[in-house]
Amino acid sequence: MAVYSHSRLSTFEQCPRKYKFRYVERFDIGDRQSVEGYLGHCVHKSLDRLYELLMAGKIWSEEELLSHYDKLWDEDKPDELYIKDEVLTEGDYRRKGRDMLSGYYSMYHPFDQDKTVALEKNVVVDLDEEGLYRVQGYIDRLAVKPDGTIQIHDYKTGQSMMNQQWLDDDRQLAFYQIGAKEMWPDRDKFELVWHYLAVPEKRVSTRTDKDLQELIDSTIQLIREIEQARVDDNFPTNETKLCAWCEYHSFCPAKIHPSSLEGKNEEEISHDAVVGWVNRIAEIKKYIYELQNEESALKARIADFARSNGFDVVSGTEANARIQFGERYIPKFTEMESEKESERKKFIDFLIRTGMVDEVFSYHPGSFDSFIKKAKYNPEFKDELFEHVKLIEKAPVVRVTKKRG
């Protein structure tokens, strides 16, 4: 299954037909980019370089930052820079980017509010134990505040500043928090930070473990919908005010054939018909959800049957079910009901003392199991390490495929 990103998921939610253009058909639009997107590219790259030098001990002057931005604008420009607004010019957008950088520089210079630990950090998150559902992305800037709080920074160059409700529901930075928690399991405080550079203003949100689990569950459901759309080749067009900025605008069937549906004008379609379509979709989605739950229950029963009889393949009339069992190592504190925090601290202290903490933890949840099974630990500390480790059975994986011939 494909590795998804926030952008990929949002594209499907915004317009399934746009998703098909971009990720299924991979429609080639050439070296064409909107001026808004290009402005964001140049501003992001300039701030990235600012903090890259800061991590090396050099603080750029505002003039050096703006000079770098101007150089980027000239060198990275695509063959076609699309400007929708007939009044504004490329120079207007270029100056807008300079103003954003100047405002940011004035607000945060000398940039000692936190310590940057990573730039454009790639994060990959497994949403389920089997790794069937995965998301990835790049954190603009990852930093640590003096009190130890991990901050996930994101730069926004659009004109609109979202309200707090939108920030608290945002999916992208919450994904990054899941990845950051796996990188630093000893940290309890995380902040999601948006910099609205056109205002300029900084906004902050936080997530609880419950929030993150709800995000994981809803994202898995959305990925299932997308995969089903691929199977059914069902990618309808969703026309909104964003269509004017879509890079596939001139190729979209809805724009090539406006106001048409099976040969009828929109005025001829009754309100009752539209209501019926919506209701039918709701029924279908409910039915799909029920089928997915039934599938999960049947797979669990097949796995139990296979385990009891020592099988790894169970045959049906036209298909085979292959069952994969396995075990994995986990820290004991993860399954404790009491004294969890004290045992967790003992384990972290042990890893730090023996120099193994960087080997054990990474953004990939399977790293701990691999660390133990491949004996990457210092054998001198093996006995002490295994006092903190437990072997458990992995959730069985059941894959059903058609028989050949």
Image (cartoon, rainbow, N blue to C red):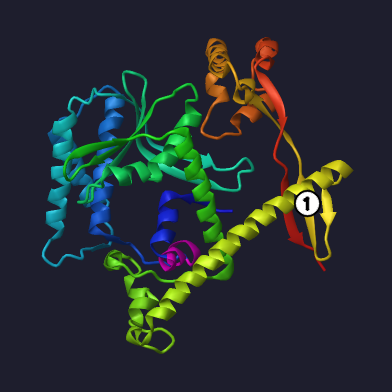
Question: Picture quarter containing residue 34?
Answer: bottom left
Q: Which is more toward the observer, 238 or 137?
A: 238
Q: Is residue 213 above or below residue 241?
A: above
Q: Is residue 314 above or below residue 139?
A: below
- Tell me if 219 is positioned left or right of 48 in this view: right
Question: Picture quarter containing residue 332?
Answer: top right
* Residue 257 position in % (x across, y down): 36, 83
Q: Is residue 241 above or below residue 73?
A: below
**Which residue is located at x 35 percent, y 80 percent?**
256
Which image quadrant: the C terminus? bottom right
- Tell me if 26 is positioned left or right of 203 in this view: right
* Residue 71 position in % (x across, y down): 20, 45
Amino acid tagged 1: Arg
* Residue 61 position in % (x across, y down): 15, 30
Q: Is residue 228 magenta?
A: no
| Residue underneath mark 1 | 322
**Which residue is most to the right?**
309
* Residue 209 position in % (x across, y down): 47, 33
* Residue 249 visible, this orientation: yes
- Tell me if 133 is positioned left or right of 328 in this view: left
Q: Secondary structure at mark 1?
A: strand
Q: Which is more toward the observer, 299 or 347?
A: 299
Q: Is residue 23 magenta?
A: yes
* Residue 122 visible, this orientation: no
**Which residue is located at x 55 percent, y 53 percent?**
2
**Which residue is located at x 50 percent, y 30 percent?**
182
Range shown magenta: 16-25
Main SS, magenta residues: helix
Q: Callout 1: few (<14), some (14-19), or many (20+) C-alpha neighbours within 10 Å?
A: some
Q: Is residue 95 above or below residue 378?
A: below
Q: How many marks?
A: 1
